[in-house]
Amino acid sequence: MAQLSDDCFAHGGKLLSVEDAAALVVARVPPLEGRETLPLIEARGRILASNLHAPGPLPPFFNSAVDGYAFRHADLEPAGETVLRLEGRLAAGQAAGAALPPGTALRILTGAPMPPGADTVMMQEDARLEDGLIRLPPGLKPGANCRPAGEDVAQGELALPAGTRLGPAEVGL
């Protein structure tokens, strides 16, 4: 059987490398010059035309990283269980309100702002609630289970570089 001169096996043994093929494509495709501003909901799948810097810190405020109980670390007993009076509840989206008095704890949910005075959160799984009192085991470090403002991205920091394809995570940022 005769081999055709234009079949897929007639390459003569010389193929382009992936890098050379990519360079040829890039050389022949003109860059996009137009830019458009879209509502965020329509930007998914698009390519970011310029660097995006954070207009403010992310997260924007000191908040709880877990569901648990916010309290003053200074109230913890150094060796043994600590008992604090439960003062209320704070969920994400609510204002932090008044300062947390010494000797008290506040039920706090993930993402809720830390009340003034509180600096530590005990995970709900590690605490015991009995008759309006919270019993906390020893050993928690100051600032545990909390997220400071700007922990993910500081104000002015590069959040997304130009050329980033905007997926769900980037649009949600």
Image (spheres, rainbow, N blue to C red):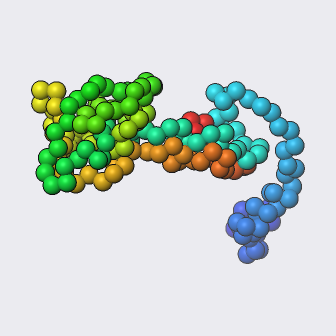
Residue 74's place in the image compared with 69, above or below, is below
91 relative position to 56: left or right: left
Decide which of 72, 155 is in the foreground and name it.
72
Residue 168, above or below 151: above
The residue drawn where x is 15% and y is 55% is 79
172 relative to 126 in the view: left or right: right
Which residue: 31% across, 33% down?
A: 101
Q: Which of 165 and 4 is in front in this view?
A: 165
The picture places residue 10, in percent across and down from the top left corner, at 75, 68
* Quadrant of the drawing holding the N terminus: bottom right
The answer, for residue 4, to whether it is visible in the render is no
Determine whether 12 is above or below 138 in the image.
Answer: below
Q: Is residue 60 left or right of residue 9?
A: left
Image position, residue 42 (x, y; %): 67, 28
Number of numbered discs overlaid on the protein picture: 0
Q: Where is residue 24 in the image (x, y as percent from the top left)?
A: 82, 61
Quadrant of the snapshot with the C terminus: top right
Residue 12 seen anywhere in this rendered image of the structure: yes
Frontmost residue, 160 versus 14 = 160
The quadrant in which residue 56 appears is top right
| Residue displayed at 41% across by 35% down | 116
Q: Residue at x 19, y 54 (%)?
A: 78
Residue most extreme to the front: 102
Residue 84: % across, % down: 20, 36
